[in-house]
Each structure stands twice: as structure tokens, then as C-alpha cells.
């Protein structure tokens, strides 16, 4: 019998709330963190809205020596990891170093660091590391920094599959726990709201160019015209159920099932892979569609992608047969940080017995979804499915269930 993987700690940094409790309160109240970009002047760009984290001062949380060595993304990840470990009751110094690992994800991050390197090259000459070299190794920085800071010498790695990567990282943590590692810090914080990162995101053609934050990101809505990017995500402490029991840890719930698929070549006429990922994740969890209480949608806000997701949900669950929510309408799409934040939200939903809202969206009836509206829905939540899709065809689905299930 496989070792169960449970979540014992959460660390959240989101545009509508810094820290797990602030985020959860803001989310239930329908508070949005979307607005005009503040970190640089966006006037010359066609898209000018983002979900930015307000009030974060790394100097209040990290040693001064780390500040010049890191960028905003890494600082947020380090602090979120500290919060998650504190929440779990884990003191890394008291555990064997090789019993602890770090597996995170990255997608759009690294641009701020690379931009700073380009600035150094321009101003000071070629003795500085090239931006391309910097970007190539940057994917490993968050995982490595968390490992070094906490003395964790077990399995380490970074998953890179755009927005799907956050779930892939948690799934890889689960694999390592099944192989014998007692504890893995996982999830993702992503951030690239800087000029270079913004240009790269605009190249996808999927960013909303709306000027009104309340109508800019509208998944499953007839008015949908792209997403609003954001920064942040969640770091989770995952453990073997046995390890958590031995130290008397509180458990949010279990990572019960996971699957990943890849979409076929465009124009092939073959069905997208999302439905199969949902079915495989349920099979991996030993559950049926009727066992799932809520689906946290990927919510691309691109008409064709919304249609594909709605059709997959309907094929697996039936039309309007399961509540669907997209709280990322309050944070923007956080790339590899989005799905870990949805996982954290799902665990909080199970703990509180409430499904968070989807704000500002007037759901298109043609999609046939029971989309949770602008108010939270109070109901028993024993299990949840989290859906994430990455650019170019990545599909990842994870099923989680409460400790009482």
C-alpha cells in the first residue's frame, strides 16, 4: 500500500492577501488584488493591469545579507516557506537533513533577475554574467535557496511546465515521499512583473487589454478576452502521514490523486487531453466523480480554452453537477504559483466548509457549469479537484481530500 502524503503547513503570498489568514479573509470577502501596474510605468504597453502583492518588505522577514543576492520572486518564496514551516510546526534544525527535500516550480519567474543583469551589462561591461546564463540557472534558485536556508539536503528539483508546473511539483514531492523522504517543501511562488517579463507575457497573445480591473479577467463569461497576470502563490509542507502522526502534526488533508496529459498537435482532430487528466487523477485517488465536492478551474478566460475546460468538466461530472469556482479572478493568473494557491484554498475550504467565490463573472449558460458566483457558498467540502493548464498543451489535475474523509 502506498504511503499517504498529507499537507501540514501552508504559506501564502497573494495579491489580495499577504499571509494565509489575510488571503483567506480577503478571498471570502471577494476582495480583488487586481489593478494598474505599480512596479513600473505601463503606459506604453497594451496590457496595463496585474495582480501585485502590496505591503511586502523583505527586510522585515529576511537577513540583510540575502537581499542583494535575491530578487522579489525568491524573497517571497523564502518568506512563504518560512510561514509554511512555522504553520506545520516543523523546526528544520531538529530533523535529519536528508529526511527533508524541496521541490518547487517556476514558469514566468527569473525575468526581473535577468533584467537586472542586462542593466549591469549595459552600464558596467561584459565582466558580469550574461542575462541568458542567469535565466538558465534561475529556475533552480528558489528551490536551492529554500534548501540552503533550512538545511534540507534531501531530494531537490524544479518543475517547468507553465501554470501546470505547480501541480507537477506537488506530485513530484508526493513521489519522493512514497520513496521514503519524510518531508518535502513544495508548491511555487512566481513573479515577473517587470518590463522584460511583461513583454514576454504579451507575446502569448493571452493577456487582457481591458482597463477596468473589474471586467478585465472574466473566465467562462461571454465578455472574456484574456487573463490578468499576477505574482505570488503558495508553499506547502507535505509529509508522509506516518511522519505527521509521529510528531502530532495537524493535517489539512491528503494529496489523493494526480495525473498529467499533453494536448495533441493543433489541427490533428484529436480530443484535448484535459478530460483524460481528470479521469486519471480520479482513478489515482480511488474516487469517482460523485466523490468530488468542488472543482477549482484553470479559468483561462480565452473563449476556446474556456470551452475546452467546460466540456471536460461536463464530460466527467455532468452538466451543472458539481460546483466550479475560480478564485483566481481576485488574484490574476500566477503562472506556476496559481495551482498551489488553489490547493491551499481547497484545503482551507475543506477546513471551513465554504467554497470561495468567483467575482465579477456573468457565467455563460452555454458552458453548462454550476459556477459559484460573487458570494461564498457554504457547504460540506470533503474533497476538491484542482485543474491547471500550461501554455503549449500541458494539463495537470490533482485531487485532494480532507483529513476526515
Image: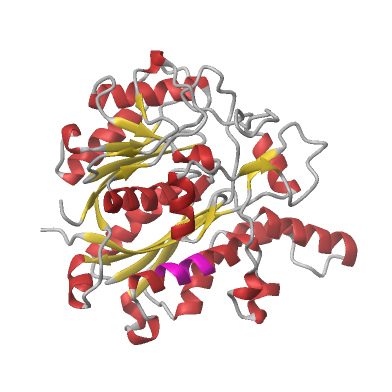
Q: Residue at x 43, y 52 (%)?
A: 24
Front-lying residue, 149 or 30: 30
Q: Total number of numbered labels? A: 0
Q: Is residue 81 magenta?
A: yes
Residue 105 visible in the displayed image:
no
Q: Is residue 352 left or right of residue 327?
A: left
Residue 377 visible in the displayed image:
yes
Which is the main secondary structure of the residues drawn in magenta?
Answer: helix
Q: Residue at x 79, y 58 (%)?
A: 118
Q: Position of residue 329 (x, y in %)?
A: 51, 37
Q: Position of residue 274 (x, y in %)?
A: 35, 31
Q: Quadrant of the N terminus?
A: bottom left
**Span colored in magenta:** 79-84
**Is 46 situated above or below 378?**
above
Residue reaching furthest left?
1
Q: Is residue 137 left or right of residue 386?
A: right
**Is 354 situated above or below 102?**
above
Q: Quadrant of residue 182?
A: bottom left
Q: Is residue 196 left or right of residue 392?
A: right
Q: Is residue 137 magenta?
A: no
**Is 79 situated above or below 230?**
below
Front-lying residue, 297 or 98: 297
Q: Position of residue 243 (x, y in %)?
A: 21, 73
Q: Position of residue 144 (x, y in %)?
A: 51, 70
Q: Is residue 332 left or right of residue 261?
A: right
Q: Residue at x 24, y 33 (%)?
A: 279
Amino acid at each position: 500500500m502506498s504511503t499517504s502524503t498529507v499537507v501540514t503547513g501552508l504559506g501564502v503570498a497573494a495579491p489580495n492577501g499577504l499571509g494565509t489568514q489575510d488571503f483567506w479573509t480577503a478571498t471570502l470577502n471577494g476582495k480583488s488584488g487586481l489593478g494598474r501596474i505599480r512596479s513600473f510605468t505601463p503606459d506604453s504597453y497594451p496590457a496595463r493591469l496585474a495582480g501585485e502583492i502590496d505591503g511586502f518588505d523583505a527586510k522585515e522577514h529576511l537577513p540583510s545579507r540575502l537581499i542583494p543576492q535575491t530578487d522579489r520572486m525568491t524573497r517571497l518564496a523564502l518568506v512563504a516557506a518560512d510561514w509554511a514551516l512555522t504553520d506545520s510546526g516543523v523546526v528544520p534544525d531538529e530533523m535529519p537533513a536528508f529526511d527533508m527535500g524541496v521541490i518547487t516550480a517556476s514558469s514566468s519567474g527569473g525575468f526581473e533577475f535577468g533584467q537586472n543583469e542586462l542593466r549591469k551589462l549595459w552600464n558596467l561591461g561584459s565582466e558580469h554574467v550574461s542575462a541568458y546564463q542567469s535565466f538558465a540557472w534561475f529556475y533552480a534558485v528558489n528551490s536551492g535557496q529554500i534548501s540552503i536556508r533550512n538545511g534540507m539536503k534531501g531530494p531537490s528539483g524544479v518543475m517547468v511546465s507553465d501554470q501546470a508546473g505547480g501541480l507537477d511539483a506537488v506530485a513530484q514531492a508526493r513521489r519522493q515521499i512514497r520513496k521514503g523522504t519524510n518531508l518535502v517543501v513544495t508548491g511555487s511562488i512566481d513573479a515577473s512583473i517587470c518590463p522584460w517579463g511583461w513583454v514576454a507575457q504579451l507575446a502569448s497573445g493571452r493577456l487582457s487589454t481591458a482597463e477596468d480591473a473589474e471586467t478585465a479577467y472574466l473566465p467562462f463569461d461571454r465578455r472574456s478576452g484574456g487573463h490578468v497576470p499576477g505574482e505570488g502563490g503558495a508553499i506547502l509542507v507535505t509529509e508522509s502521514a506516518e511522519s505527521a502522526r509521529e510528531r502530532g502534526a495537524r493535517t489539512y488533508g491528503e494529496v489523493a490523486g494526480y495525473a498529467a496529459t499533453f494536448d495533441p498537435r493543433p489541427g490533428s482532430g484529436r480530443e484535448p487531453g484535459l478530460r483524460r487528466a481528470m479521469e486519471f487523477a480520479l482513478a489515482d485517488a480511488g474516487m469517482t466523480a460523485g466523490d468530488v465536492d468542488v472543482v477549482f478551474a484553470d479559468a483561462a478566460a480565452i473563449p476556446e480554452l474556456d470551452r475546452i475546460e467546460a466540456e471536460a468538466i461536463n464530460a466527467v461530472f455532468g452538466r451543472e453537477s458539481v460546483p466550479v469556482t475560480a478564485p483566481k479572478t481576485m488574484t490574476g493568473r500566477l503562472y506556476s504559483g496559481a495551482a498551489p494557491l488553489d490547493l491551499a484554498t481547497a484545503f482551507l475550504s475543506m477546513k471551513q466548509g465554504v467554497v470561495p467565490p468567483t467575482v465579477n463573472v456573468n457565467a455563460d449558460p452555454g458552458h453548462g457549469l454550476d459556477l459559484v458566483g460573487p458570494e461564498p457558498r457554504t457547504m460540506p467540502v470533503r474533497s476538491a479537484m484542482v485543474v491547471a493548464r500550461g501554455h503549449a498543451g500541458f494539463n495537470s489535475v490533482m485531487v485532494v481530500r480532507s483529513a476526515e474523509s
